[in-house]
């Protein structure tokens, strides 16, 4: 067997493991993914499951990387070319609500799940979950600040508070869709976000000044 063929097989095996882990994680949580469960579904040994990643933590980090990639593909990439400020912020919120309402992952948004699952834990997986959430809230706050500078929102609007409340709406939507099977939840989330962006909150505690996300 040629080295190229061996490498291709190894890559396929790794992807099979990762696909299975993502599916399990969306339902059972990233921390609930076990080598035994993946082995039972894929026919691999436990050592064969862990081997391509080195450790279970590295496999879980790979799962979070998939979650971030899918989120970006579904929510950010479709709107990233729009003008920064309120147009892009509103479009991003609509894409976010659509993504959550469609349950792209079987168990709901993996980023949201991970942010709850690891909020009181320390370690590389919780660090990555925290970075993912902080990064998205930074994007939301930055576009809010651009909207303020452009006169699209009241100058006393607090960008960090807007990002905080938008994320709260999304978490409520994810729970309503997955746990409560509430078909009206996406419409309620849209109404809540529209009300927030038409009457944004004034400065809250410890607000930070952020730059235009297009400046990155």
Image: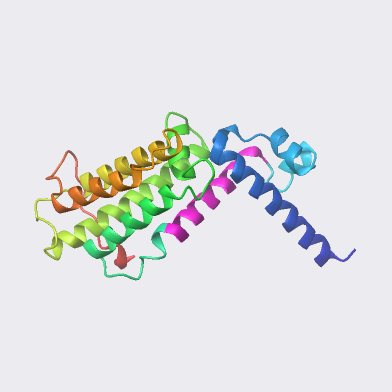
| Residue 25 spot, x, y in % from top left | 57, 39
Identify the residue at image location x=32%, y=56%.
94
149 lies above or below 178: below
Instruction: Give yes or no for residue 64 being in the magenta stretch.
Output: yes
- On screen, residue 52 versus residue 140, left or right, reads right
Instruction: Give yes or no for residue 113 being in the magenta stretch.
Output: no
Identify the residue at image location x=38%, y=42%.
183
- Looking at the image, what colour scheme do you see? rainbow
- On screen, residue 124 versus residue 89, left or right, reads right
| Residue 152 spot, x, y in % from top left | 14, 62
- Tell me how many marks there are: 0
- On screen, residue 76 versus residue 23, left or right, reads left
Residue farthest to the right, as pictured = 1
- To which quarter of the image does residue 147 belong? bottom left
Residue 25 visible somewhere in the drawing? yes
| Residue 103 spot, x, y in % from top left | 48, 47
Q: Nearer the viewer, residue 43 or 184?
A: 184
21 lies above or below 87: above
The chief SS type of the magenta part is helix
Residue farthest to the front, as pictured = 183
Identify the residue at image location x=18%, y=48%.
195
- To which quarter of the image does residue 178 belong? top left
Q: Quadrant of the N terminus?
A: bottom right
| Residue 74 spot, x, y in % from top left | 45, 58
Tell me the magenta residue range: 55-74
Q: Quadrant of the C terminus?
A: bottom left
Residue 118 visible somewhere in the drawing? no
98 lies above or below 41: below
Residue farthest to the top, as pictured = 120
């Amino acid at each position: 067997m040629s080295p190229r063929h061996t490498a291709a097989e190894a890559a396929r095996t790794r992807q099979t493991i990762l696909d299975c882990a993502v599916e399990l994680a969306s339902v059972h949580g990233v921390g609930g993914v076990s080598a035994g469960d993946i082995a039972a579904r894929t026919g691999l040994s436990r050592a064969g499951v862990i081997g391509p990643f080195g450790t279970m933590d590295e496999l879980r980090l790979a799962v979070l990387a998939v979650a971030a990639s899918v989120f970006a593909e579904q929510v950010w990439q479709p709107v990233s070319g729009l003008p920064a400020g309120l147009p892009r912020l509103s479009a991003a919120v609509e894409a976010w609500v659509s993504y959550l309402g469609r349950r792209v992952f079987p168990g709901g948004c993996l980023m949201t799940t991970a942010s709850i699952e690891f909020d009181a834990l320390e370690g590389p997986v919780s660090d990555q979950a925290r970075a993912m959430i902080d990064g998205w809230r930074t994007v939301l706050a930055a576009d809010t600040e651009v909207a303020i500078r452009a006169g699209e929102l009241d100058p006393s609007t607090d960008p960090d508070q807007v990002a905080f409340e938008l994320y709260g709406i999304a978490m409520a939507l994810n729970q309503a869709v997955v746990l409560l099977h509430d078909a009206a939840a996406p419409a309620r989330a849209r109404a809540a976000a529209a009300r927030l962006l038409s009457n944004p909150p004034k400065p809250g505690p410890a607000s930070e000044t952020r730059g235009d996300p297009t400046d990155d």
